[in-house]
Image (cartoon, grey):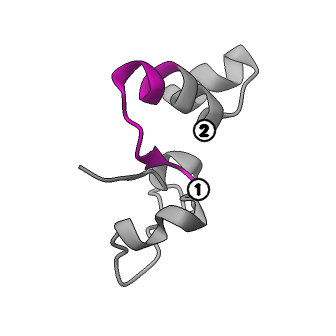
Amino acid sequence: MGYLTAQRLGQPFEMLMEEALFAPLGLEHSYYQVPESQQDHYAYGYSKRISPYGSTQACWMLKLTV
């Protein structure tokens, strides 16, 4: 749903989420592309997560810390 909304608004999904969701909620450590300076704060699984659609869509690659 979010991906379709981003397409309709003409913005990349990642940018829309960062501007419309992360920032207003104060989620300062939530990323789609984790900056090099923050890599040590994130845990990664053993395998690449694949979406049910057979590709790695942006909405499946969200990384957060608590």
**Nearest to N terminus: mark 1 or mark 2:** 2
Percent coordinates x, y for residue 35 in the rendering: 58, 59
Is residue 57 positioned above or below 6 on the image? below
User: Looking at the picture, which amino acid does disc 2 mark?
Assistant: Glu
Q: Which residues are magenta?
A: 20-32
Q: Secondary structure at mark 1?
A: loop
Residue drawn at x 63%, y 24% is 6
Q: Which residue is mark 2?
A: 14
Q: Quadrant of residue 24?
A: top left
Residue 31, given in percent of the width and then of the height, sits at 50, 48
- Judged from this view, the residue extending furthest toward the front is 37
Disc number placed over residue 33 in the picture, else none: 1
- In the rendered image, the residue lying farthest to the bottom is 46
Position in image of residue 3 (x %, y %): 57, 32
Is disc 1 in contact with disc 2, using a CB cutoff of under 8 Å?
Answer: yes
Can residue 28 be found in the magenta stretch?
yes
Identify the residue at horizontal 48%, vertical 62% (top origin).
38
- Residue placed furthest toward the left: 66
Residue 29 is covered by the magenta coloring: yes
Q: Kindly identify the residue that appears in the image at 49 percent across and 56 percent down.
A: 61
Q: Is residue 16 left or right of residue 43?
A: right
Other-residue count near label 2 (Cα within 10 Å), few / some / many at <14 / 14–19 / ≥20: some
Q: Looking at this view, is 24 or 7 the one in front?
A: 24
Residue 55 sits above or below residue 46 on the image: above
Q: Is the residue marked by circle 1 packed among few (<14), some (14-19), or many (20+) residues within 10 Å?
A: few
Provide residue 66's location: percent of width, then percent of height: 23, 49
Residue nearest the observer in this picture, 13 or 26: 26
Judged from the image, the secondary structure of the residue bearing numbered disc 2 is: helix
Identity, as a three-letter code, of the amino acid under mark 1 = Gln
